[in-house]
Image (spheres, rainbow, N blue to C red):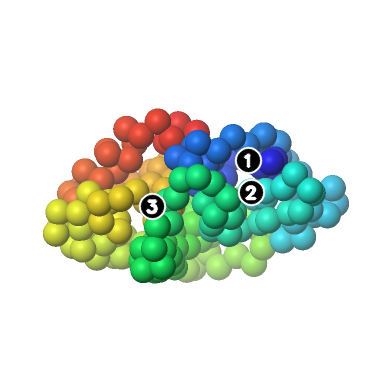
Amino acid sequence: MKLYNSMGPNPHIVRMFAAELDVSLELIEIDLMAGENRESAYLARNPAGQLPALELDDGEIIAESTAICEYLDETSTKTLLGDTAAERAQTRMWTRRLDLSICEPMLNGFRYSEGLPIFQNRMIMIPEAAAGLKNVAQDRLAWLDQQMADGRQFIVGERVTLADVFLYCMLTFGKAVGQPMSPDHTHIAKWYVRMAARPSAEA
């Protein structure tokens, strides 16, 4: 399988997830800064123009980080989604919570401010929303920190899941673009150290 790869948190999510599953992917680098993902050759594969995208051995394309990870999980001998329907539902519930309440506000807070020169000709920008979106992400991180005060080792409980990989990659990105996590989030900080120590974090 080929992974159309680039800089940024979403490709990192897929690379880390695949590494956790011991799945090897051939990386095809796409120059995001040069806008290669907006050129016809890439758009023929993924008309949304986003990265990453997974090309299966038969040429079929799967886009969207969560969908790619779920496909890899379903076709692997290991699982980060869960062994039962209830475990998989819990993983999906937490991944969606994190994506909507923390990750998307964080990403758009970056796009509408520090990332404005990169994205202003590629999508509709709302610069006046940037500060508020960043605040939303931090507020929801504070909520998550309270949830993890029960002593759980990972987001869903005692097992690493897609939710952990998703949030770890996003927080790593946030730290690099001016949205570091508050030191007050002590439970998430300890979790982050545990995730950073995993070999897959370097993928």
Which mark lies nearer to you, 1 or 2?
2
Q: Position of residue 114 (x, y in %)?
A: 51, 50
In contact (CB < 8 Å): disc 1 and disc 2: yes
Dot 1: element: loop
Considering only order in the chain, which callout, 1 or 3, is on the residue closer to the N terminus? 1
Q: Is residue 59 left or right of residue 15?
A: right
Residue at image mark 3: 161
Residue in the picture at 83% in, 54% down = 44
Q: Which mark identifies residue 52?
A: 2
Farthest residue in the left direction? 150
Give the residue displayed 25% in from the left and 56% down from the top: 157
The kind of residue on which mark 2 rests is Pro
Does residue 200 appear left or right of residue 117 in this picture? left
Q: Crowding at label 1, few (<14), some or many (≥20) Cα neighbours within 10 Å?
A: many
For mark 3, give the secondary structure: loop
For residue 50, above or below residue 192: below
- Looking at the image, which residue is at 40% across and 57% down? 82
Residue 196 point in image, percent of width and height? 34, 36
Lower position in the chain sequence, tag 2 or tag 3: 2
Position of 61 with respect to 12 (left or right) is right
1 or 2: tag closer to the N-terminus: 1
Q: Which circle, 3 or 1, is nearer the viewer?
A: 3
Q: Which residue is mark 1?
A: 6
What is the crowding at mark 3: few (fewer than 14 residues within 10 Å), some, or many (at least 20)?
many
CA separation in Å, label 1 and label 2: 7 Å
Q: Nearer the viewer, residue 42 or 131?
A: 42
Kindly report which numbered mark, 2 or 3, lies closer to the viewer in this rendering.
3
Q: Is residue 47 above or below residue 93?
A: above
